[in-house]
Image (spheres, grey):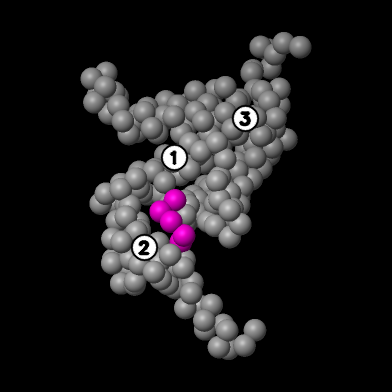
Amino acid sequence: MSTIADRRLEEKDRRRSAILDAAEAEAARTGVDGLAMERVARRARISRALLYVYFRDRTDLQFGLCERGLGVLATRFEEAVARHQDGLERIIAIGRAYLAFSQEFPVYFDALARFQAQDSAPGAAGSCASACLAAGARVHAILFAAIEAGQQDGSIEARVGTPVAIAMTLWGFMHGIILLTATKGAVLAEHGLTARALGEQALRLAARGLAPPAADDRRE
């Protein structure tokens, strides 16, 4: 590739990143559903017409935020896995990383929650939807591998289910817990529960459900 072509590609990547920075800042102010292309263009200091060159509509822009958020989440999961040896410890660390991600990056989590609510990614070729799905597959692969490792090293009961089935169940469980803490904080407080306490309770239940029973409790 020529030097001129390299520079053009770098400039395109920088501009796309600047647009997503602007979209993230706007979403932090208005919520993901409140994103307006005109305000994002103004914050990014580009024309609205140029914005549409990079993102065809607001939905596409939201998918761009999802892709970026999933990249952050995958990195957090990889770091969590690297700090632990057995599979069950890795899964609990991943759960804590997901909880922390939702609190540190509420815009990304909000965008992902809306993406996950879709029956399927409605993107045409060239849109951000396919890139978002690919980023999500990377995140899932980390979770699948941790569960498989746990079943191999004996820290996760093999009869609980396949790695994919377990991963999807845990994902739904923890995602629901996060949404509950985000929307029902007052109700939880009435019962003396904080978001952190509920998250840790969920992780304890998950660990107990995944761990193999004591040897004298095993039943064929």
Q: Quadrant of residue 218?
A: top right
Q: Estimate the x, y position of residue 179 in percent, counting from the top left.
A: 38, 32
Q: Quadrant of the C terminus?
A: top right
Q: Is residue 154 visible?
A: no
SS for dot 1:
helix
Q: Mark 3 to mark 2: distance in Å?
A: 35 Å
Residue occupied by mark 3: 166
Local SS, label 2: helix
Please tell me which residue is depicted at 26% across the width and 22% down the height of the picture: 187
Residue 167, given in percent of the width and then of the height, sits at 60, 34
Magenta-tinted stretch: 55-59
Q: Nearer the viewer, residue 208 or 101?
A: 101
Tell whether label 2 touches label 3 (CB within 8 Å): no
* Residue at 72% from the left image edge and 11% from the top image edge: 219
Dot 3: few (<14), some (14–19), or many (≥20) neighbours within 10 Å?
Answer: some
Q: Which mark is residue 113?
A: 1
Q: Is disc 1 surrounded by few (<14), some (14 to 19) or many (20+) residues within 10 Å?
A: some
Q: Is 128 part of what is drawn in magenta?
A: no
Q: Earlier in the sequence, mark 3 or mark 1?
A: 1
Give the side of residue 183 with respect to residue 92, left or right. left
Distance between the Cα atoms at labels 2 and 1? 19 Å
Which of the two discs, 2 and 1, labels the residue nearer the N terminus? 2
Residue at 50%, 54% in the rendered image: 67
Compared with residue 98, is residue 1 higher up or lower down, i.e. above or below? below
Three-letter code for the amino acid on which mark 2 is drawn: Asp
Percent coordinates x, y for residue 96 in the rendering: 45, 39
Q: Does residue 121 lie above or below 4 as drawn?
A: above
Pointer 2 residue? 21
Q: Is residue 133 visible?
A: yes
Q: Who is closer to the viewer here, 130 or 109?
A: 130
- Dot 3 or dot 2: first in sequence order is 2
Amino acid tagged 3: Ile
